[in-house]
Image: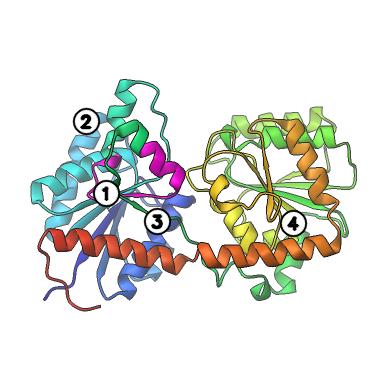
């Protein structure tokens, strides 16, 4: 019996949920006694991937150029042959087209994870997106995404596997965050003692809703709060400058911090009185509300996408109308004014909810089960893990 070798393909290994999921599954694959290979254009998370015991192969998989996508088929064929790949798992559209062709030519299983709605407004976009439902099976990260796949691409239910994303509950655990980490972050962000803190984690891109939150702060008319926007602009300097101008124009200087990426999100959540996910487009899953709940923090999120599945409205947080600064401001006022007793009740319920439903190990076990299913269908004889 042979040890399976799994190849995951994605554009790059910078920050983000897709990248985090790839690293988590790579580590789980190695712990199961299998071999894990990840192909991407590289990035900040390569070192973390390699520490997990996986092999990274740098390829220009971040391109959307049709000719380059075609050339990547040959590159991936070489990887499949050289590494003895038994199954290919694609996590993004452009590399998925190359990976699907290569897997088909080598007659090995092809699995996909459908990470977002991708925008399906015309026939060409739906065709381009359709590679993400060519996995046998295709993994959906939420019930919202599963419904979208069925309705938009007419995929039979029996070809889908629902696997919600999981988080590292050892990392995102209040009792594991020591005070010195919070104090260091408080110093770095220049947070005054005693000021209520509103935290919006997420890369600086328009659909993450930073402008909506800033407008809500204007409507809130409170001078005692601090809002932290934690996330990289990833080269979107124009949007960052727009946010800075909006902050200045609304007279919120000193009350809104744009702090870039945070390397200690567990401590960041502990500093927050309320965590916001203001995405104007539906999140396929949305890690922020789950991580925040695992840390015992009340969450305000927009009422669409994955948030409808991960938040218990009125119990662990609030769901507000997407893009609506007024409803956001009302929820912020409620969250900031919570009594100590109500805050403790929310914390207990939120932590239990996250731990029961969104454990990283459950996600990893379910994904490896999908691999085993696909390999067994292809006749691969696996060694016992």
Q: Please give the residue where the numbered disc 2 appears in the rendered image.
A: 67
In the image, what residue occupies the spot 26% across and 38% down?
Answer: 131
Pick the quarter of the image with the N terminus.
bottom left
Question: Disc 2 vs disc 1: Cβ atoms closer than 8 Å?
Answer: no
| Helix, strand or loop at mark 1 | helix
Cα distance in 3D space between marks 2 and 1: 34 Å
Q: In the image, which disc is placed on residue 272?
A: 4
Q: Tell me, yes or no, whether the two marked residues, 3 and 1, touch with CB atoms within 8 Å.
A: no
Quarter of the picture containing the C terminus is: bottom left
Residue at image coords 78%, 44%: 332
Residue tagged by mark 1? Answer: 158
Lower position in the chain sequence, tag 1 or tag 4:
1
Q: What element carries label 2?
A: helix
Visible in this render: residue 366? Answer: yes
How crowded is the residue under tag 3: few (<14 C-alpha within 10 Å), some, or many (20+)?
Answer: many
Q: In this view, does 198 lie to the left or right of 52?
A: right
Q: Nearer the viewer, mark 3 or mark 1?
A: 1
Q: Earlier in the sequence, mark 3 or mark 4?
A: 3
Q: Where is residue 130 in the image (x, y as percent from the top left)?
A: 28, 34
Q: Mark 3 points at which residue?
A: 163
Q: Between disc 3 and disc 2, whose residue precedes?
A: 2
Tell me which numbered mark, 2 or 1, is placed earlier along the sequence: 2
């Amino acid at each position: 019996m042979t040890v399976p070798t799994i190849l995951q393909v994605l554009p790059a290994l910078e920050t983000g949920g897709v990248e985090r999921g790839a690293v988590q599954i790579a580590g789980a694959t190695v712990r199961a006694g299998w071999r894990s290979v990840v192909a991407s254009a590289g990035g900040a998370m390569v070192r973390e991937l390699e520490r997990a015991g996986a092999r990274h192969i740098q390829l220009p998989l971040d391109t959307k150029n049709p000719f380059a996508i075609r050339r990547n088929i040959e590159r991936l064929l070489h990887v499949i042959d050289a590494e003895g790949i038994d199954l290919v798992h694609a996590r993004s559209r452009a590399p998925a087209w190359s990976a699907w062709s290569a897997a088909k030519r080598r007659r090995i299983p092809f699995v996909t994870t459908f990470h977002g709605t991708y925008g399906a407004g015309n026939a060409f976009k739906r065709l381009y997106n359709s590679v993400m439902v060519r996995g046998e099976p295709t993994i959906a990260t939420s019930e919202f995404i599963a419904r979208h796949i069925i309705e938009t691409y007419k995929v039979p239910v029996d070809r889908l596997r629902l696997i919600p994303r999981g988080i590292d509950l050892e990392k995102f655990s209040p009792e594991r965050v020591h005070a010195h980490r919070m104090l260091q972050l408080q110093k770095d962000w220049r947070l005054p003692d005693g000021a209520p803190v509103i935290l919006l984690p997420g890369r600086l891109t328009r659909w993450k809703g930073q402008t909506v939150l800033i407008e809500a702060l204007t409507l809130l008319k409170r001078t005692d709060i601090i809002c932290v926007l934690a996330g990289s602009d990833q080269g979107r300097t124009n949007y960052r400058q727009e946010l800075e101008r909006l902050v200045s124009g609304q007279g919120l200087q000193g009350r809104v911090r744009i702090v870039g990426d945070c390397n200690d999100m567990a401590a960041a959540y502990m500093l927050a009185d309320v965590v916001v996910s203001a995405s104007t487009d539906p999140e396929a899953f949305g890690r922020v509300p789950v991580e925040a709940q695992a840390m015992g923090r009340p969450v305000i999120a927009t009422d669409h996408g994955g948030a409808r599945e991960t938040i218990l409205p009125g119990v662990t947080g609030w769901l507000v109308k997407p893009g609506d600064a007024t409803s956001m401001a009302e929820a912020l006022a409620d969250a900031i004014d919570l009594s100590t007793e109500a805050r403790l009740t929310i914390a207990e319920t939120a932590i239990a909810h996250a731990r029961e439903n969104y454990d990283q190990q459950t996600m990893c076990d379910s994904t490896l089960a999908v691999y085993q299913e696909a390999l067994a269908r292809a006749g691969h004889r696996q060694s016992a893990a």
